[in-house]
Amino acid sequence: MSVIYTGKTKNIGVIGYPIQHSLSPVIQNTVLQNMDLDYAYIAMPVKKGQLGNAVTGLKALNFTGFNVTIPHKINIIPYLDYIDDAAKLIGAVNTVVIKDNKMYGYNTDHEGFINALSTINFSVKNKIAAVLGAGGAARAVIYSLLKAGVKKLYIGVRNREKAQKTICDFSALGEIHVYNWLDNNFTKFLSKIDLLVNTTPLGMYPYIEEMPPVDFNQIASRTVIYDIIYTPEKTKFLLEAEKNHNIILNGEYMLAGQGAAALQKWTGSHNIDIDLMRIALHKALLEKI
Ligand code: NAP
């Protein structure tokens, strides 16, 4: 499908560095064209020291908004006129809307994460969950699980002291406990959980032989196993889970879901086709490897 951009076309995109490997232009433009929405989404390399200039430029160029990725997800915050509560608590912004020369910041990773679970008809309400890792992505995951009404949340990490701040930040939202993931108590809890989420990069391409230290002999087959990594499609963690007859979910839906939520904010459309975005992402990932 060829697209003609005109003087009426609205501009959106993503800033980050490096940015040439971003799949956002592919997934966003696929959906924009399919929905006949007159927007153009481009990837813009913005180095660390250039964020202020880039923000001024995007406003001057009358951009509708933009995604923010590494290394700017935290540093963008001082430039915003408004930040929504979720993004504030998560401490990172991945989506900015520009309106009347003002910048509004959001985090759509948490929406992408939780919405993905509906694809397997899993509701976290009153369930017990465990999250492995407590880094940037884990903050969005923890926020969305607690907001969605999880009964108890266990966090397993390699460095308990380092993760303590994360736990303090979210403790007002619900019951949350942090353990070293080799602690016997943590491994005991794993046998009782309904959902186990990996948010560490262990197993991500090219280190596909790695996985977090989880003994699947201890995990009930009813437990849903979710790895937010999307390359490879099935990490070693998910392959082990499959052998244990668990339902599995990878990070593709989360990535597509955060993109769809961002597109909804820029266009105001509530009919963004997440499935189309996920299929475009899947195809782009296969072509990339
Ligand atoms: P991050 O901020 O660097 O956090 C990584 C977490 O994993 C930290 O808790 C870190 O522990 C732990 N970790 C890292 N390497 C480890 C190792 N070798 N052994 C044990 N623990 C280790 O990274 P992030 O931004 O959260 O990203 C994490 C993963 O999520 C990546 O694979 C990324 O691709 C994926 N992700 C997916 C989506 C999606 O939409 N599907 C979105 C965002 C991120 P320490 O604090 O002790 O270092």
Image (cartoon, rainbow, N blue to C red):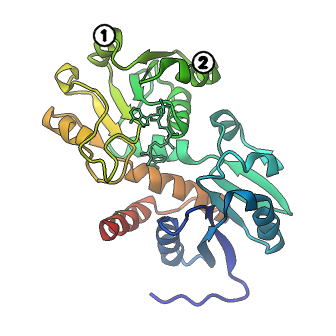
Distance from Cα at disc 1 to Cα at disc 2:
23 Å
Q: Residue at x 48, y 53 (%)?
A: 257
The kind of secondary structure element at disc 1 is helix
Q: Is residue 5 above or below residue 162?
A: below
- Residue 51, quarter of picture: bottom right
Outermost left residue:
243
Q: Which residue is mark 2?
A: 171
Q: Secondary structure at mark 2?
A: helix
Please tell me how crowded label 2 is: few (under 14), some (14-19), or many (20+) other residues with Cα within 10 Å: some
192 lies left or right of 157 = left
Any atom of ligand 1 within 8 Å of the CB at mark 1? no
Q: Amino acid at mark 2?
A: Ser
Q: Is residue 283 above or below residue 112?
A: below
- Disc 1 designates what residue? 184
Q: Is residue 42 left or right of residue 184?
A: right
Figure check: 280 above or below 180: below
Image depth: mark 1 or mark 2 in front: 1
Residue flagged by tag 1: what amino acid is it?
A: Asn
Taking the spot 29% from the left edge, 36% from the top edge, the residue there is 211
Q: Quadrant of residue 117?
A: top left
Quadrant occupied by the N terminus: bottom left
